[in-house]
Image (cartoon, grey):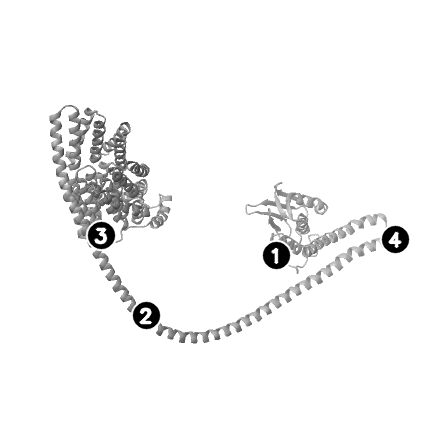
């Protein structure tokens, strides 16, 4: 087990709390707020946008360091544009966290120093303490523990000045990690228990989980394996509940190491495999290096030297690449153990020496002792017994020192644990007293509230009685008002019905008069003509001359009757069987052929501009009647040798439009406003053609029954345009 790994967890906690411990839904809200800027990078940014980007970067660090790198990089770029030092410092600090996580400690240190300089310029004490902790963690990774402690002490001093217990807990925790790495377990436990006490007090579960895990690491170093497993499992349960993937992976690794130390190898392997999945996914290089070392030891205990050497090589490569001295020393030690087991004493001697050199440089007592033991075995195997003896003596001296130190530290750890439990018990007693006092205060308050409630209830009863009387009067007034409104509405409806009846009577009288006149006139003409023919009172030439006039009257009457009968049928029948999609140009061309004689009488030309595929949805026969009436009006009011323009098209809004435009006499605004009403007066055409004045009224009704719309545009003396629209499809 290697406490250095836990720096990652602690660092995550720091980053996670950098902007006041925001929750996931807050991150989602912030992403929505910055989304307009991300979608439009040309938009000018401000300090609010930059702070939000840094906040999002912080929240992502736990699960997606790559996202942290992206958002922090964006915040740095925008801060440079605005000269915003606070945004720059926060961005560099978080970028440094990611580099540190990836094992690029040199780049991480550069970014932490840049952030520290900017925090000093802005007098941001908390930011300075964050940068000091970052620099301390880098030195810890590289085995420079004394320098790491100096950085941490600087951060601790600042946080003691600011008076924030949460920040103090963070410092105590990370200082404890470094003391753990130095082998000063009593100091480490003292820091961990201080941090844990604060975390529990403030119900900070993430920080408490880190403390439990770190205490478990120390307990394992002291070979107190049951306690080590207990603390590790406590941390694991918290991390599982909070879905902290880095914490979960570390707990699994530590539990696996504790089980392997107890020679429960198969169960240990299961935990290593679980941790490996997360380490690989998150690209946790330091964690992967430790994992390879543990797998190498597992294969060593399983008597699989080739596999053991493979994993140890992988661990050494990562440790060397990322300058992890402690991990390098462990890897060298593993090589020495495997080679000694395989009687390859030459290689065992080489790696034991390498382990001893690194252990001396970082000052870790247990590694020095283990290196001396492996050197003693290798030298004895090489026949260098005197040197082997000296290394064995050194091993016993170091072991005795370590054992004595561990015995003392075990006692201290026991005392610290007892003190912690006593403090927690004292806190629990105080909490119970506070709760009892609180319950008493609540009871007194409830009694006061009861009396107040009774008084208020009495007042409310009086108010309710008054209110009910008032409401009753208001209901009566409302009923009277509603009755008056109902009477007025009935009167309005009756007036409207009377007006409609008057209009219908007028329409009926007009239709009867028109039928009497328009039917009687051509019949009288025919009767007179037949009488003259029967009396031989006219010649054949006179008969031929009179026939066109009679036929014209009959055509006019027939057209009117067709329109009238079709309109009446549309009023009576609600059938939609004849409604369909039809080709509009076909109907127009058919009607133009039918009216060819009328057009020739005035030498009127037509110009048709309708695409052959223009369709409409209606009853084709009804639309033919409409087109016939509009064309008849156009011919009626057009002069000789003019042109009637017919245009049609399908629009994007799902409608089909047809317009018929003449160059005739046009209409005044008064005529135009009453054009589609039932009371229109008929005017003679340019050659005294007569009409009923009812045709366009019928047309309007027919078009609107097919969900269409009809209109007219006209200028007196310049002509008229009549048009209508229909649905293109069902």
The residue carrying mark 2 is 449
Discs 1, 2 touching: Cβ within 8 Å: no
The structure residue drawn at horizontal position 83% and vertical position 55%, both measured from the top left corner, is 528
Query: In the figure, 371 relative to 247: above or below?
Result: above
Q: CA distance from mark 1 to mark 4?
A: 48 Å
The residue carrying mark 4 is 534
The structure residue drawn at horizontal position 27% and vertical position 64%, both measured from the top left corner, is 438
Mark 2, Cα crowd under 10 Å, few <14 / some 14-19 / many 20+, is: few
Residue 712 vs residue 626, the one in the foreground: 626
For the view shown, which residue lies furthest in the front direction?
263
| Residue 88 visible in the current orientation | no
Q: CA distance from mark 1 to mark 3?
A: 89 Å
SS under mark 1: helix
The residue carrying mark 3 is 198
Residue 692: x percent and y percent? Answer: 70, 57
The label nearer to you, 4 versus 3, is 3
Residue 445: x percent and y percent? Answer: 29, 68
Discs 2, 4 touching: Cβ within 8 Å: no
Residue 171: x percent and y percent? Answer: 20, 47
């Amino acid at each position: 087990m290697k406490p250095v790994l836990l720096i990652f967890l602690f660092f995550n906690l720091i980053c996670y709390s950098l902007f006041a411990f925001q929750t996931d839904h807050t991150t989602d809200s912030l992403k929505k707020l910055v989304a307009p800027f991300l979608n439009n990078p040309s938009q000018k940014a401000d300090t609010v946008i930059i702070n939000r980007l840094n906040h999002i970067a912080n929240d992502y660090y736990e699960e997606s360091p790559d996202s942290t790198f992206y958002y922090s990089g964006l915040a740095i770029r925008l801060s440079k544009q605005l000269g915003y030092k606070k945004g720059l410092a926060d961005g560099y600090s978080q970028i440094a966290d990611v580099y540190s996580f990836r094992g690029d400690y040199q780049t991480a240190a550069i970014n932490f120093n840049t952030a520290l300089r900017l925090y000093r310029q802005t007098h941001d004490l908390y930011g300075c303490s964050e940068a000091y902790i970052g620099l301390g963690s880098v030195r810890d990774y590289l085995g420079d523990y004394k320098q790491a402690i100096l950085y941490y002490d600087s951060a601790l001093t600042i946080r003691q000045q600011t008076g924030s217990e949460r920040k103090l807990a963070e410092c105590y925790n990370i200082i404890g990690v470094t003391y753990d790495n130095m082998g000063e377990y009593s100091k480490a436990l003292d820091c961990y228990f201080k941090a844990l006490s604060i975390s529990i007090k403030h119900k900070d579960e993430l920080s408490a989980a880190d403390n439990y895990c770190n205490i478990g690491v120390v307990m394992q170093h002291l070979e107190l394996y049951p306690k080590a497993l207990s603390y590790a499992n406590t941390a694991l349960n918290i991390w599982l509940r909070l879905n902290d993937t880095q914490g979960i992976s570390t707990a699994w690794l530590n539990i696996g190491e504790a089980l392997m130390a107890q020679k429960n190898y198969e169960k240990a392997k299961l935990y290593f495999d679980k941790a490996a999945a997360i380490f690989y996914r998150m690209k946790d290089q330091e964690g992967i290096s430790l994992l390879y070392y543990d797998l190498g030891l597992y294969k060593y205990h399983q008597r699989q030297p080739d596999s053991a050497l493979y994993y140890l090589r992988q661990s050494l490569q990562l440790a060397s690449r990322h300058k992890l001295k402690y991990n390098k020393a462990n890897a060298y030690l593993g090589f020495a153990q495997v080679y000694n087991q395989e009687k390859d004493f030459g290689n065992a001697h080489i790696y034991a020496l390498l382990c001893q050199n690194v252990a001396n440089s970082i000052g870790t007592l247990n590694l020095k002792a283990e290196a001396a033991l492996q050197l003693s075995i290798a030298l004895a195997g090489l026949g260098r017994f005197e040197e082997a003896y000296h290394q064995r003596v050194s091993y016993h001296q170091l072991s005795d020192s370590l054992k004595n130190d561990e015995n003392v530290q075990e006692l201290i750890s026991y005392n610290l644990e007892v003190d912690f439990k006593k403090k927690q018990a004292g806190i629990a007693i105080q909490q119970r007293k506070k709760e009892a006092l609180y319950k008493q205060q609540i009871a007194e308050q409830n009694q006061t509230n009861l009396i107040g409630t009774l008084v208020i209830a009495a007042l409310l009863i009086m108010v309710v009685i008054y209110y009910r009387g008032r409401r009753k009067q208001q209901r009566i007034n409302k009923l009277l008002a509603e009755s008056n409104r109902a009477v007025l509405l009935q009167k309005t409806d009756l007036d409207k019905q009377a007006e409609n009846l008057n209009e219908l009577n007028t329409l009926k009288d007009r239709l009867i008069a028109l039928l009497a006149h328009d039917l009687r006139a051509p019949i009288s003409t025919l009767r007179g003509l037949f009488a003259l023919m029967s009396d031989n009172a006219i010649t054949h030439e006179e008969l031929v001359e009179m026939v066109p006039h009679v036929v014209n009257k009959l055509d006019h009457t027939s057209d009117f009757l067709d329109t009238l009968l079709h309109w009446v049928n549309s009023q009576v029948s609600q059938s939609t069987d004849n409604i369909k999609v039809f080709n509009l140009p076909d109907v127009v061309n058919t009607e133009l052929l039918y009216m060819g004689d009328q057009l020739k009488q005035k030498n009127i030309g037509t110009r048709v501009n309708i695409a052959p595929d223009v369709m409409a949805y209606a009853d084709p026969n009804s639309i033919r009647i409409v087109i016939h009436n509009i064309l008849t009006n156009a011919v009626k009011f057009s002069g000789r040798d003019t042109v009637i323009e017919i245009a049609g098209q399908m629009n994007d809004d799902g409608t089909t439009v047809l317009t018929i435009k003449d160059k005739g006499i046009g209409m005044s605004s008064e005529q135009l406003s009453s054009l589609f009403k039932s009371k229109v007066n008929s005017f003679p055409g340019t050659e005294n053609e007569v009409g009923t004045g009812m045709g366009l009224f019928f047309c309007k009704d027919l078009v609107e029954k097919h969900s269409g719309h009809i209109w007219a545009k006209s200028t007196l003396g310049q002509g008229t345009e009549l048009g209508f629209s229909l649905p293109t499809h069902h």
